[in-house]
Every structure is written in C-alpha cells, then in structure tokens.
Image: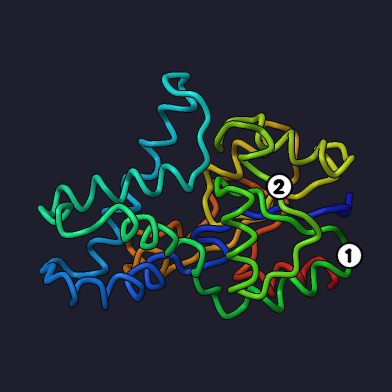
Amino acid sequence: MAPKAFIFDVFGTLVDWRSSIARTLAPVHSQKGIEANPLAVADAWRGEYQPAMARIRDGNRGYVALDVLHRENLETVLGNLGAADQFTPSEITDLARAWEVLDPWPDVVNGLKRLRKIGLIAPCSNGSIALMSHLARHAGFNWDCILGAEIARNYKPNAAVYLASCAALGLAPADVMMVAAHNSDLIAARKAGLQTGFFPRPLEHGDPAKAELSATSDFEMIAEDLEDLARQLGA
C-alpha cells in the first residue's frame, strides 16, 4: 500500500551533523585555545545524546526538550575537556544552537521535494519543534508540518513518538512510512505499525566502518539514498 505520508529521522539521515557541528566548533576552539580536534568534540557531544534521552525514556526524568539536553551535554563535554570555565553561560547557550544549522546531505532537498508530490512530509525527530524549525530554514526543508518527540513528550524509539506523529496527521500507522538511516529507529517504527524505508549514510560518523551500511530487516523500502527511495516510489 502506497504511503500517504512520510516521516523522517533527521540527525544523520537527512543532515550531516558531524561535519556541521565541527565546522561551528572550529573557530571557537581557536578562540578558546581548546586542543581537542573539533570532530572529536562533535563525536563526544553526540555521544551524550542517547544517555541523556534514556533517563527520560526510562522515567527517571520528566520530559525536557532536546535543546535543553544539548546544552547540558555540551557543558558535560566542555567539563571533560577542562574548558568549561572558559565559556560564559550565554556563550554555551549560543554554541548549543549549533544543532540548528546542520547541512543537508546532497540528495535530501530534492528527494524531499519529490516525495512531497505523493504524500505529506514531516520530521519525526527527537529534536524539538523550535530546533526543527530553525534547521528547516537553514537546510531548505519544506515540511508540511513538524512532528516527533515534542508532541509525544517522549523520545524515540518509544512507540508513542511514532504513534503521536501518525495521529497528528490523521492517518493510521499503516499509511505512514518512517524513513531513516538507522535500523533501530525503523524496527521500532515497524513494531508500532508503520511502513519503513531505509538507506545508508556511510559518512555519518566519518568512517564507513562505523555506519549502518545495510538494512538488518526486510523493510518495505531499501534504497541507496533519499532520491533513490523517491524514484522507487515513482516520484
């Protein structure tokens, strides 16, 4: 059954978070005299992502937007580098907004445009509505709406996030395709009743050996990238 809507993982799947974060960090490193490689700091910052959300998913903390977690995680990373005292609170707040200016992978803008011809498109990200709105303006994403963690007050891969996104669209889960470059995201979406579409992002972590290069399940769609996914769907 052809999907009536497509919802997307964003970090890694649609945008190159690693190179983009390192680009934002590079001049700050120079100004503050931080010796660590900006790419390594980007990796460390991203490394705090899942543990921070897990505390909320596990019920050990009430829901807070990812913007808050990103700022807290940045403070943790800077503290581990011994550099926290080099930044004012406002500088940390500004730097934490680096996640709002991530660059899209080359196939994404046109791929989204093509898919929008055959169905609604929206992010189903752990990012907040504010974060996704700013990121859309930077990356040129023409969403029909913004869905995901904030409307569910929880984080993927909790089933509530996928189901709340489908409900907001007024569609049954079976009419919605979750698209991601991460197998665990799609497996969780499938368990919630959604269709699933996979393609790899070999350079998400810089080294293809660290990427999910192939699907680990028989997802409805398996493609080379987003434009190939759109082509297979006839867009």
Query: Measuring 26% from the left and 48% from the top, which residue is drawn there?
Result: 75
Residue 147 is labelled as 2
Q: Relative to residue 161, is residue 39 depicted above or below?
A: below
Q: Quadrant of residue 34?
A: bottom left
Q: How many marks do you count on the picture?
A: 2
Q: In the image shown, does 61 or 117 lie closer to the viewer?
A: 61
- Local crowd at mark 2 within 10 Å, few (<14), some, or many (≥20)? many
Question: In front here: 204 or 39?
Answer: 39
User: Which quadrant of the structure image shows residue 24?
Assistant: bottom left
Residue 82: image location, x then y, percent: 10, 53
Which residue position holds label 1? Answer: 118
Q: Which mark is residue 162?
A: none
Identify whether 48 is placed above or below 210.
above
Sequence-earlier tag: 2 or 1: 1
Gap between marks 2 and 1 measured at Cα: 19 Å
Is 186 drawn above or below residue 193 in the view shown? below
Look at label 2 and name its amino acid: Leu
Instruction: Name the element at disc 2.
Output: strand
**Residue 66, x across and y down, in percent:** 49, 44
